[in-house]
Image (tube, rainbow, N blue to C red):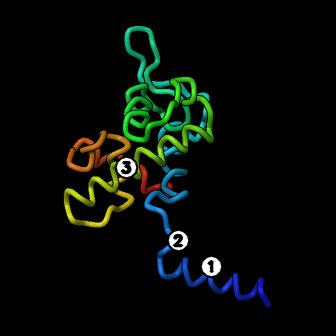
Amino acid sequence: MKKTILTLVVALITVCGFANEMVSEKLLDAIAMQESKNNPNAKGDKRKGKYMAIGAYQLWDVYIEDVNRFAKTTYKSSDRWNAKTSREIVRKYLTYYGKRYERLTGKKVTNEVLARIHNGGPNGFKKASTDKYWKEIQRYL
């Protein structure tokens, strides 16, 4: 009986949207597929002989530094190689800037806005250059 009631409560919370997080697992999966085919060993954006974008999400050091700044975390550049940790980093980044988007615009954040922020930085949702990225992400959603 207790298990049935608990199942109903969880279902009700989910249907009402209370359990929904700003950044869905499906979106995180789509970003990882678009960026690297979900390869935690991927390297990209080579500049002056050094790979700038690392891991499944193709994270740059500046992305890590930004998360550490606002979340008071201590992620390291090497954490980009770890599938679980890099996913946490992306979730924190998108949640932070998704909430900022909502404050600035008065609109509810969408997967499109979040994907464009990942690709173009905190104001990526404003950049025409991230439109193509969003179209590519949609293939995986």
Residue 19's label in the rendered image is: 2
Q: Answer yes or no: do the residues labelled 2 and 1 have beta carbons within 8 Å?
A: yes
Q: Amino acid at mark 1?
A: Val
Q: Note whether 50 is above or below 6 in the view shown.
A: above
Residue 24's label in the rendered image is: none
Q: Answer yes or no: do the residues labelled 1 and 3 have beta carbons within 8 Å?
A: no
Q: Amino acid at mark 2?
A: Ala
Q: Residue placed at 34% from the left, 54% from the top? A: 98
Image coords of residue 54 (percent x, y): 51, 27
Image coords of residue 109 (percent x, y): 33, 61
SS at circle 2: loop
Residue at mark 2 to residue at mark 3: CA–CA distance? 18 Å
Residue 96's label in the rendered image is: 3
SS at circle 3: helix
Task: Report whether 37 appears left or right of 68.
Answer: right
Image coords of residue 1 (percent x, y): 80, 90
Going from the N terminus, do you reach mark 2 or mark 1 first? 1
**Mark 1 neighbour class, 10 Å CA radius: few under 14, some 14 to 19, many 20 or more:** some
Q: Residue placed at 48% from the left, 48% from the top? A: 91
- The residue labelled by disc 1 is 10
Going from the N terminus, do you reach mark 1 or mark 3 first? 1
SS at circle 1: helix
Going from the N terminus, do you reach mark 2 or mark 3 first? 2
Q: Amino acid at mark 3?
A: Tyr
Q: Answer yes or no: do the residues labelled 2 and 3 have beta carbons within 8 Å?
A: no
Where residue 49 sits, quadrant-wise, is top left
Q: Note whether 3 is above or below 81 in the view shown.
A: below
